Amino acid sequence: MARLKKPKKIVLKPQQAHAIITWLYGKTSVAAKDFSKEDCGFAQAMLVEMLNASFAMGFVEALFRAAAKVPSGPKKVITTFLKGAGKNLVKYKDKDDLEEMMKQPTIYKAVKNQMARAAKSVWKIREATGELTY
């Protein structure tokens, strides 16, 4: 996975960003109402990176049966994100791929685990100090 790029346009709302962070880490000490615009951008950058990596892994899905269906909370966020600005931010092969992802959004478990590992210290520092640097 590449280094997270700060989004130019942040489209996730605090509740949606909180759902993504909670899904990724299991819990967070930062309440949804306390999510800043930067926090939303961080969650969005991770979501974009996970979707891009999952699209890239799609062609080997038969070999990697360890696919994880996203729970209903984040699933709705992902679908809404892809329907809106996400389709301009996420790399996909063709329109059919994007439409299929919108019907049944999938983030590969390996991708989720890698993202959680890669950004864990960044989020832990944010929880402890209130500062977000990525």
Image (cartoon, helix red, strand yellow):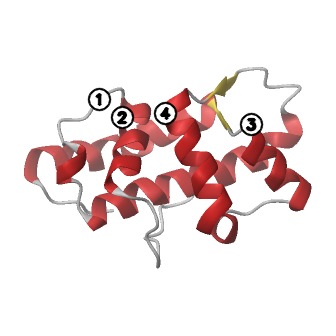
The location of residue 17, given as percent across then percent down, is 38, 50
Q: Earlier in the sequence, mark 1 or mark 4?
A: 1
Residue drawn 20% across the image and 50% down it? 33
Q: Which residue is mark 3?
A: 104
Residue on which the image places disc 2: 22
Dot 1 amino acid type: Lys
Which amino acid type corresponds to the residue marked 2 in the rendered image?
A: Thr
Residue 30 left/right relative to 4: left
Element marked by disc 4: helix
Whether the residues at callouts 2 and 1 have beta carbons within 8 Å, the answer is yes
Q: Is disc 4 surrounded by few (<14), some (14 to 19) or many (20+) residues within 10 Å?
A: few
The disc, 1 or 3, on the residue closer to the chain's N-terminal end is: 1
Q: Name the quadrant containing residue 124.
A: top left
CA distance for labels 4 and 3: 13 Å
x then y, percent, for residue 103? 77, 41
Q: Amino acid at mark 3?
A: Gln
Q: Amino acid at mark 4?
A: Gly
Q: Which part of the image, by quadrant, shows the C terminus?
A: bottom left
Contact flag, marks 4 and 2 (Cβ < 8 Å):
yes
Residue located beneath label 4 in the image = 73
Residue that mark 1 sits on? 27
Q: Answer left or right for 54 relative to 80.
A: right
Closer to viewer: mark 2 or mark 3: 3
Task: Mark 3: give few (<14), some (14-19) or many (20+) Cα within 10 Å.
Answer: some
Q: Quadrant of residue 49?
A: bottom right
Name the residue rendered at 65%, 26% in the picture.
69
